[in-house]
Structure formats: structure tokens, C-alpha cells
Amino acid sequence: MLYNKGNHAQLKRVQPQPSRLQGENGGKIYSTWNPGKSFSTNNINSENMCLPRLLGFAIDEKFDGIHTGNEKADVKYQDMLAENNQSVQIGIQLKSKEKNTPNRGVGQNSPGIKGLYAQFFFTLHKGLTGNKLFDIIGISIPSKIFDETRVTFINISKELNMPILVLDEEAWVSITAAALDNIEAQNKMC
């Protein structure tokens, strides 16, 4: 189950956990475009992993990280709600880590957040016009998000009755830890 700060979408696949990366990378997640490399702990620690592939490995899905410009979301998959085992279609929009994150977090004027707003509103609009794309909209940026910005996304989604999943830096630390656990489990099976 993935649950983080104010989201009202609880999912079963990724269990929140303390990250073993806290000491190695200061709990920071870095993203780079590199879909050709195989997945290993060296890739994560050397910052050579694209975010869709990292998320996919954590939840046992295969995401290639290739963008065509025509996709409805960067990551799309089925999951189950923890509270009632209802199947849901999730679409997550991903943005790269902001290079210069203020202590308070990235806000509405950062390029990544502006892009997430555009994708978020496009997806909401589709749902309101009868062409609902997803049961849960996800927004993701592996940077700290300014509290007011996070609250704005959550309040808009509540007003329009569309659950939201917010994946920020803290969530990506948990996702990375889950991916590392999967690597260890696979290595033990070999």
C-alpha cells in the first residue's frame, strides 16, 4: 500500500518503509534518462535510472520510460484499493527532479510543477467531459513539493471527486527502497 501525506488514494503494491538510501544519498532521488541499462543497485546509486522504470520495478510492472508525446500519462497501470480491493486504473504524470529546490519545496512557478498542472487539468477535463481516462490521477516529481502547492492539487481533486496520488521526493525514497528489495529478492532466487 502506498500512502503519503494527504493523498486519498491508498494502493497495495508499494509498502512505505524507511529508506536504506538515507545515508548513501541523503535520502535524495535523482532521475536521468537511461532506459537501455539493466536495473541494479549500481544504477540507482549512480543516478542512472529513469523514473518510470524505477517505479515499475518497485511494483512488478514493466515501464519502458519512452515518451511518444501521445500518451495519456507517463505511467499507466491497474492496482487495487487497499480499503475494498476495488480495481482501479491509475495514470501518473512524471516530471524530473528540480535542480534547485528551495528549502520550502518546489512551487507553482517551477517548470516541473507547471507541467504537472497542465497534465493534471487535461486529465481532469477529459473526465468531466465524459472521457474519463483514469480512476486515480498521479502527479510525480522527485523533489520536495511546497505545502501550498500540494494542498492545491489535493483540494482541486477533492472538489472534482477525482482521487489523486502525489509522489514527491519522500515517496520516491520509499519506491527506491522497494525496488532495491525486489532486486535483492531476485538475486536470491538466482
Image (cartoon, rainbow, N blue to C red):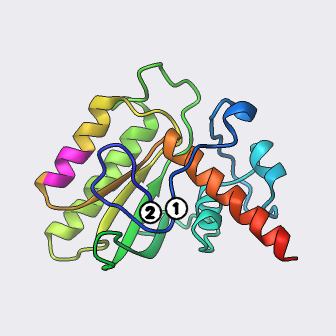
Q: Classify mark 2: residues with Cα within 10 Å, few (<14), some (14-19) or many (20+).
A: some
Q: Residue at x 47, y 33 (%)?
A: 144
- Give how far across and how far down residue 112 sits, in percent: 45, 40
Q: Amino acid at mark 1?
A: Val
Q: Residue at x 57, y 64 (%)?
A: 67
Q: Tell me which label, 2 or 1, sits earlier in the chain.
A: 2
Give the residue furthest to the right: 190
Give the residue furthest to the top: 103
- Give how far across and how far down residue 81 sits, in percent: 34, 71
What residue did someone put label 2 on? 1
Do the residues bearing badges 2 and 1 touch, measured as CB atoms within 8 Å? yes
In magenta stretch: residue 170: no
Q: Residue at x 35, y 69 (%)?
A: 82
Q: Main secondary structure of the magenta part?
A: helix
Quarter containing the C terminus: bottom right
What residue did someone put label 1 on? 14
Left or right: 172 in relation to 115: right
Q: Which residues are magenta?
A: 154-158
Q: Classify mark 1: residues with Cα within 10 Å, few (<14), some (14-19) or many (20+).
A: many
